[in-house]
Amino acid sequence: MTRLTPAFMQGSLERLSGHRNEPERVAAILADAKSRYAVFSGDKLLVHAGPAGSDGIWWHDRADLPNAISGVEPVLLGLDADGVAHFAMQAADPELQLGAGQAAVDLRSIALQGLVDDGMLGVAAQARALLHWHVRHRFCSNCGATTVAGEAGYKRVCGACSAEHFPRTDPVVIIAVVRGSSMLLGRSGRFSPTMYSTLAGFVEPGETAEDAARREVEEESGIKVGAVRYVMSQPWPFPANLMIGMIGEGLSEAIDIDPDELADARWFSFDEVRAMCDGRHPEELEIPPSISIAHHLILAALDGR
Ligand SMILES: [Zn+2]
């Protein structure tokens, strides 16, 4: 299945961000028998194993939830169009016993296989990123005491020093570098030997996204980049990144890869990149699947968008 947009970009719920600090309202929707709960077992989401339910996620009622991991309460995802609240929770058991018709699947596989509809894929990413943060922040990074969740799961507060901690989103720049009608693509040692993609890296403290993109490309490939422009962004819940997609102008040609970062990098002609996109490259080289922002950045750069 070729997607027209990257995965995880749409969330079909109203997030209620302006109401999370109203404890009585949050308590009322938590207690509402109509509220529905998505359950993660380790990093896997419980979905329908066979032909999907309405959106593919296996929504639990409050009455049939498994035991939650200690210190991690359900997080509020939002309200649907009918006003039904949706939550996510982390099962204590990372190898949860599955019921008939249930499967526990990681989000990447869910996206690749189309197991959850688009409106809920973004919600699943929201849930995964939030729960991953809660599981790893049960203790205060200021004083080491126990923290408790507040604001329906959008902060944690230390019981000893009162420090407030907020969920992380880590910005990553990802950039298609173009020079004339050639595109710079690289292959990480973690990729399949035939897959080439746009270069990417984390934004560092005190750095603009544009400078981070220029720095990462030069570090990894030796290529200097001039003007860069923003194209789109994508939540990438592995565990909590925001991919900031850009297209940049290559100012130099000689490639000098950092072997710690890349196994290979090359300038590909646009014709060759089109062949990679269409699955007809003579060396069977390919670009990443259409769940990824890299795929869509490459198409945008080819089209001059
Ligand atoms: Zn503290």
Image: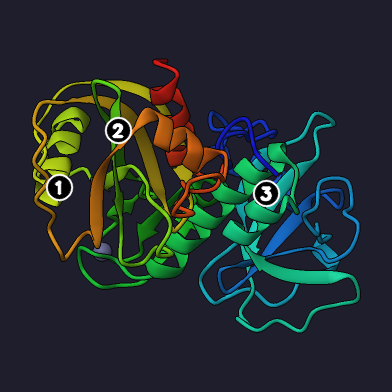
Tell me the quarter of the image containing the C terminus.
top left
Q: Amino acid at mark 1?
A: Ser
Which comes sooner in the sequence, label 1 or label 3? Answer: 3
Residue 95 spot, x, y in % from top left: 65, 84
Q: Amino acid at mark 3?
A: Ala
Asked whether, in this view, residue 172 is left or right of residue 47, the answer is left
Q: Are marks 2 and 1 in contact (CB under 8 Å)?
A: no
Q: Nearer the viewer, mark 2 or mark 1?
A: 2
The local secondary structure at tag 2 comes to strand
Q: Is mark 1 within 8 Å of ligand 1?
A: no
| Foreground pick, 67 / 285 | 285
Residue found 42% across the figure and 52% down from its top: 240
Q: Are marks 1 and 3 in contact (CB under 8 Å)?
A: no
Residue 132 spot, x, y in % from top left: 47, 62
Crowdedness near tag 2: few (<14), some (14–19) or many (≥20) residues, C-alpha within 10 Å = many
Which comes sooner in the sequence, label 2 or label 1? Answer: 2
Q: Which residue is mark 1?
A: 221
The local secondary structure at tag 3 comes to helix
Q: Are marks 2 and 3 in contact (CB under 8 Å)?
A: no
Residue 183: image tag:
2
Q: Amino acid at mark 2?
A: Met
Residue found 64% across the figure and 51% down from its top: 111
- Regarding residue 216, the answer to whether it shows in the image is yes
Residue 27: image tag:
3
- Regarding residue 205, the answer to whether it shows in the image is no
Q: Is residue 96 above or below residue 255?
A: below
